[in-house]
Each structure stands twice: as structure tokens, then as C-alpha cells.
């Protein structure tokens, strides 16, 4: 028997203590929203009923914590991220070259490209939103503006999580955090301001700008060097241009070095792709640490 929604949520948390934190957040958010909506409907119709009696009826329809936990685990088993399972290989050399057949590597590479754009947007949105919100707090309309800004931060965090899961294969929340729909807007603003998750999301948005810039510079630099090595034979044989220009004199690589140059460019990019795969996994853990509410 549960007397409050919080008691049910605590029981659900205990039942899913070994589950993925993102899955637990989804389960908690869904349950809190369902219970909040159901309680509001029943109280409007029968205001004399106490919360414990109403919860008993709601739980009979929604399910006990044990039943809810089992249902979420079953759904999770069927819908795990597509990139979650690693590509198996028998040898280190096979794993090294097999990076081109690993969707996690290509997903991480694409994410690193996108992170530069999202990082600039997140940073601009966070800094502008914080600055304007603080400035407007001297006016009455500043409080609704701050509320909308914080809600937008949570929305962007959810979208970022979906991007991380799709490209990096790290399980992220698929439901938005419960945002206290039944509260007055001023109380709702206070709840968002005192929620640790809100500030962690802002930290992530600012950090993404730094990381996205580093990722972009790394990709452009390594890609340029790799292509330069591979393009030297074409530059010298087709365009008759020396690969090295110093003091008005062009220097040519010998013909016998062409295979080594091409192989060197290929090796450098392959090595970088392996590093990219690792960066993707590390960034996924970083995103999960800041964007998943405990």
C-alpha cells in the first residue's frame, strides 16, 4: 500500500536499481506524469478522496512497481540501441582494419562533425538565455521568460540524448523529465532552478562548444594530412609539381616512395578512425553522466 506518489516512485527505483540509469529515468518520468495526471482528474471529480485511496485505484490500472519494472526491462531488451553491440574480431590487426566495417566508428565520426554545429548553438543559446533571463528578472515578465528558457534547456538535452544514442550507441533517456505541470509557474520555476539536472544540462551545453571545436579541428587536421600523403603521387606525376616547396625550389619525392606515402596516409586515417571510435564511447559516457538524472 502506497500513501503518496513518492513512495511508489521510491519502490520503483528500488526494483530497478540494477537497470540502466536512462531506463530508470524513463520509467520514473512516465510514472510521475501518469500519477500526477490521474490524481488531478480524480480530485476534480471527487475532491473528498484522500491520495492513498486514489493511488490504490491508479496502481491497479498502472501496475505495481514490480510489474512496471518488468515491463520496462522487457521493452528495453527489444529496443536496445542499434550500435550498442561491438563488432567482434579475432585479431588485433583485424580489429584495427575492421574499424571501417564498424558502424560505431562512422557514427562517432558523424557525431564529431555535428558536435561542432550543435556546440556553437548550445553555447550561444545557454549564454544568451542566462544573460537575458538574469537581466529581465527585475521585471515581472522576466520570470516567465526564465521558465521558458529552462524548459527549452531540458528540451535540447532530450534532443541531444537522442542524437547521442543514435550515433554513439549509448542508451539515453527517451522521455523528457517531468516538469511539474500541476504547479504554478513561479513554483515551477523554483523547482527547475533547484533541480541539479537543470544545471548539469547547462554545463553540458557549454562544454559541448569546447569539445565540438576540438573534434572539428582534429578531423580537419588529420584528414588534410592523410589526403596530402595520398595525393603526392598524383601531384607529381599528373601535374608535375613537387610536393615540397622551399625558397622558390620544388622538391620531388622519388617514385619508389609512392606506395609508402599512400600507405602512410591510409594508416594515419585508419589509426584516427580507431581513435574516433574510442572518443565516441567516451563522449557517450560524458553525456550520460550529465544528461541522465540520478
Image: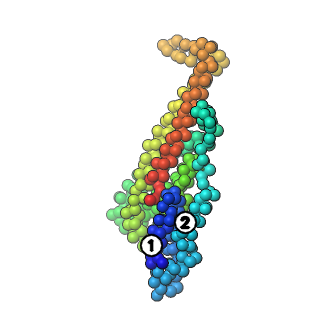
Name the element at disc 2. helix
Q: How many marks?
A: 2
Q: Which mark is residue 140?
A: none
Mark 2 sits on what residue?
69
For the residue pair 12 and 251, the one nearer the viewer reads as 12
Q: Residues within 10 Å of mark 2 (few under 14, many from 20)?
A: many
- Is any part of residue 208 visible from this angle? yes
Residue 232 picture location, percent across and down: 60, 20
Instruction: Look at the picture and state if 138 lies above or below 80.
Output: below
Instruction: Look at the picture and state if 167 lies above or below 22.
Output: above
Instruction: Look at the picture and state if 167 lies above or below 11.
Output: above
Identity of the residue furthest to the left in this view: 138
Q: Quadrant of residue 93?
A: top right
Q: Earlier in the sequence, mark 1 or mark 2?
A: 1
- Marks 1/2: CA–CA distance: 15 Å
Q: Quadrant of residue 184?
A: bottom left
- Is any part of residue 163 visible from this angle? no
Residue 267 picture location, percent across and down: 58, 27
- Residue beneath the point at 44% across and 59% down: 294
Mark 1 sits on what residue?
7
Q: Residues within 10 Å of mark 1 (few under 14, many from 20)?
A: few
- Residue beneath the point at 54% across and 33% down: 272
Name the element at disc 1. helix
Instruction: Look at the picture and state if 230 lies above or below 173.
Output: above
- Residue beneath the point at 48% across and 61% down: 17
Residue 58 picture location, percent across and down: 54, 77
Amino acid at each position: 500500500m502506497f500513501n503518496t506518489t513518492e513512495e511508489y516512485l521510491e519502490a520503483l527505483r528500488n526494483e530497478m536499481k540494477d537497470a540502466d540509469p536512462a531506463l530508470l529515468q524513463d520509467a520514473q518520468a512516465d510514472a510521475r506524469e501518469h500519477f500526477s495526471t490521474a490524481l488531478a482528474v480524480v480530485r476534480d471529480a471527487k475532491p473528498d478522496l484522500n491520495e492513498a485511496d486514489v493511488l490504490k485505484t491508479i496502481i491497479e490500472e498502472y501496475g505495481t512497481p514490480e510489474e512496471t519494472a518488468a515491463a520496462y526491462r522487457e521493452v528495453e531488451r527489444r529496443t536496445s540501441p542499434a550500435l550498442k553491440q561491438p563488432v567482434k574480431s579475432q585479431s588485433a590487426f583485424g580489429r584495427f582494419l575492421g574499424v571501417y566495417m564498424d558502424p560505431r566508428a562512422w557514427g562517432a565520426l558523424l557525431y564529431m562533425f555535428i558536435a561542432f554545429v550543435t556546440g556553437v548553438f548550445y553555447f550561444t543559446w545557454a549564454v544568451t538565455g542566462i544573460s537575458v533571463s538574469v537581466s529581465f528578472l527585475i521585471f515581472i515578465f522576466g520570470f516567465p521568460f526564465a521558465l521558458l528558457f529552462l524548459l527549452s534547456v531540458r528540451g535540447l538535452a532530450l534532443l541531444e540524448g537522442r542524437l547521442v544514442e543514435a550515433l554513439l550507441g549509448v542508451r539515453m533517456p527517451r522521455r523528457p523529465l517531468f516538469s511539474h505541470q500541476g504547479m504554478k509557474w513561479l513554483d515551477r520555476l523554483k523547482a527547475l532552478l533547484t533541480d541539479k539536472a537543470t544545471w548539469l544540462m547547462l554545463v553540458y551545453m557549454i562544454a559541448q562548444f569546447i569539445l565540438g571545436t576540438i573534434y572539428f579541428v582534429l578531423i580537419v587536421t588529420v584528414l588534410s594530412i592523410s589526403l596530402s600523403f595520398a595525393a603526392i603521387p598524383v601531384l607529381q606525376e599528373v601535374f608535375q609539381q613537387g610536393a615540397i616547396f622551399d625558397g622558390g625550389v620544388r622538391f620531388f619525392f622519388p617514385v619508389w616512395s609512392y606506395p609508402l606515402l599512400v600507405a602512410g596516409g591510409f594508416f594515419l586515417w585508419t589509426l584516427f578512425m580507431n581513435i574516433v571510435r574510442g572518443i565516441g564511447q567516451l563522449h557517450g559516457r560524458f553525456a550520460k553522466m550529465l544528461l541522465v538524472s540520478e
